[in-house]
Image (cartoon, rainbow, N blue to C red):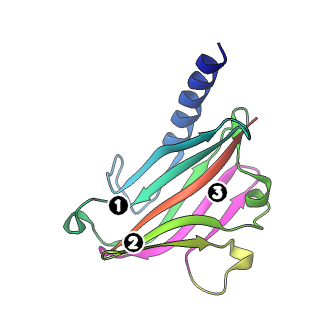
Amino acid sequence: MKKHFLKTLLSAIMIVLLLSVISPAFAEDDPALAASFGEFDEESASITWNIAVNSFDKAEDRADFNNVTIKVTADPTLHEFPEDIRDCVSPISVTYTNNSETRNIEFPSFANRAAGKPYYSYDDSQHEISIYLGDVSAEEAYLIHLDTEIV
């Protein structure tokens, strides 16, 4: 019974998250922007989501995008972002690829950024994270790891 409930809940949460990933730089259903379920930690009741930007297997399939902003909304009746992210205290973990070099980086909040982009902000009234990437070249790909906690 517990497994069925969790599976149903995860399906509902994933649908809410997938429908909420938007950016004016991408056309509707653009394969250059995709959200997927990463992993579920039963002990902490948290889910890691992966948002892929310009993340194709072949570099020649990637494109240039200008002024990219991704908005991710959590349904507060199902899940929420961790408090340290909502308070813009902790960075967001990202796997970044430039050409064939891949490394782990972090996106700071707007208040904690050094200068320029990328960074994120949180709108408490909308339960929404906005991730500001700026320009993304065809040589770049991002895999953004966002956690949510089941309420």
Question: In the rendered structure, are the residues bearing label 1 and label 3 in contact, judged by CB atoms less than 8 Å apart?
Answer: no
Question: In the rendered structure, are the residues bearing label 1 and label 2 in contact, judged by CB atoms less than 8 Å apart?
Answer: yes
- x, y percentage for residue 59? 24, 68
- x, y percentage for residue 130? 60, 61
Q: CA distance from mark 1 to mark 2?
A: 9 Å
| Disc 3: CA contacts within 10 A as few (<14), some (14-19) or many (>=20) | many
The mark closer to the camera, 2 or 3, is 2
- Dot placed on the residue nearer the N-terminal end, 1 or 3: 1
Q: Residue at x 55, y 75 (%)?
A: 118
- The kind of residue on which mark 2 rests is Thr
Judging by the rendered image, the residue that carries numbered circle 1 is: 55
Viewer-nearest residue: 12 or 40: 40
The mark closer to the camera, 1 or 3, is 1
| Disc 2: CA contacts within 10 A as few (<14), some (14-19) or many (>=20) | some
- x, y percentage for residue 114? 66, 86
Q: Secondary structure at mark 2?
A: strand
Disc number placed over residue 129 in the picture, else none: 3
Membership of 120 in magenta stretch? yes
Residue farthest toward the bottom in the current orientation of the protein? 115
Q: Residue at x 65, y 43 (%)?
A: 74
Q: Does residue 102 appear left or right of residue 64 in this picture?
A: right
In terms of image quadrants, where is residue 58? bottom left
Q: Secondary structure at mark 1?
A: loop
- The kind of residue on which mark 3 rests is Ile
Q: Which residues are magenta?
A: 117-139
In terms of image quadrants, where is residue 26? bottom left
Report the quarter where the C terminus lies. top right
Question: In the rendered structure, are the residues bearing label 2 and label 3 in contact, judged by CB atoms less than 8 Å apart?
Answer: no
Membership of 101 in magenta stretch? no
- Dot placed on the residue nearer the N-terminal end, 2 or 3: 2
Disc number placed over residue 97 in the picture, else none: 2
